Image (cartoon, helix red, strand yellow):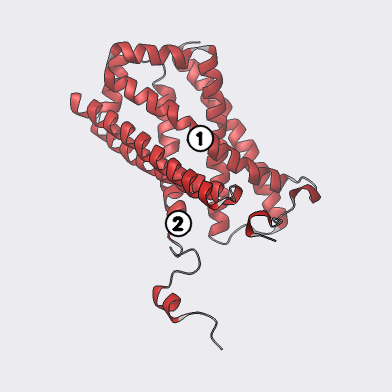
Amino acid sequence: MRLRSPLARVRHLGSAKDGTAHWWMQRVTALALVPLAVWFAAALVFHLGAGYEATQAWIGHPLTGGLLLVLIVATFYHGFLGLQVVIEDYVHHEGVKIAAILLVKFVSILLGLAAVLATLKIILSQ
Amino acid sequence: MSAENRPLSPHLQVYRPQLTSMLSILHRITGIALALGTLLLVYWLVALSLGPQAYAAAEGLIGSIFGRLLLFGWTMALFYHLCNGIRHLFWDAGFGFELTNAYRSGWAVLVASTILTVVSWVVGYGVMGG
């Protein structure tokens, strides 16, 4: 006896409706963030109190700026995926849950975009 | 019983707190804290892109006692989430599930994140010249 519907078999996506994509991307972004976060935290420590000009030159360097852009995208993607799981686990009212997830998604995109644009502006001003 | 008020599992109050469960919830708490902490990073970057005046204001805020306290908490959260995240990635790959190893890696995460936090701040103050 088959309990699974033919449509579910065709789509391969299971009850979550997006398969393992969420879980997998959380791990992919985590893996990317391990070296990126270590690099940025370490480099930031050595630029403490360097002042406006030197900090602009550091962030505006194509290599720093490029790595920072990847770090920003991975950070906000990873952060959104994590916060979504937290909301899904603790908010049980369906409407509030969907609204909270959408709000976190919009804010993540907005903050990520602001960080990306600021970084691009610094790179291009050098 | 309606779907809205069904009892939910796990019933946390019946469990004795253990290192493993405490580290697990701490991973979530630090994750949320880091997500909030991105506000500081975005503010700093935007200020840097706006010019010397905006950057000086950001430096003043981050360099204040309150800013430093925030930054210290953020550093601790970052290194904890980073170390424990690596522990999770090993679990995802199928390693370290034995109970003794789960405890060993748990203590290792606590020690490593404490050392990384302290070293960053000692080096940071050294770079800034005290």
The residue that disc 2 covers is A22
Q: In this view, does B114 lie to the left or right of A95?
A: right
Query: Which picture quadrant has residue A108?
Result: top left
The residue that disc 1 covers is B34
Disc 1 marks which amino acid?
A: Leu
Q: Where in the figure is residue A124, as x and y percent of width and height? A: 19, 28
Of A82 and A27, nearer the camera is A82
Q: Where in the figure is residue B17, as x and y percent of width and height? A: 77, 45
Q: Can residue A51 be seen in this view?
A: no
**Chain letter of disc 2?**
A
Q: Do labels 1 and 2 share a chain?
A: no
When the figure is inspected, residue B49 is found, relative to residue B90, above or below; the finding is above
Q: Is residue B9 left or right of residue A75?
A: right
**Chain letter of disc 1?**
B
**On-image quarter of the N terminus of chain A:** bottom right
Q: Where in the figure is residue B106, as x and y percent of width and height? A: 66, 45
Q: Where in the figure is residue B34, as x and y percent of width and height? A: 51, 35
Q: What element carries label 1?
A: helix
> Which residue is pictured at 42% across the width and 53% down the height?
A28
Disc 2 marks which amino acid?
A: His
Of B19 and A1, nearer the camera is A1
Question: Which residue is at the far front?
Answer: B2
User: Label 1, label 2: how many angstroms apart (C-alpha)?
Assistant: 20 Å
Label at residue A18:
none
> Which residue is pictured at 36% across the width and 38% down the height?
A72
> Which residue is pictured at 64% across the width and 44% down the height?
B25
Q: In this view, does A67 lie to the left or right of A76?
A: left
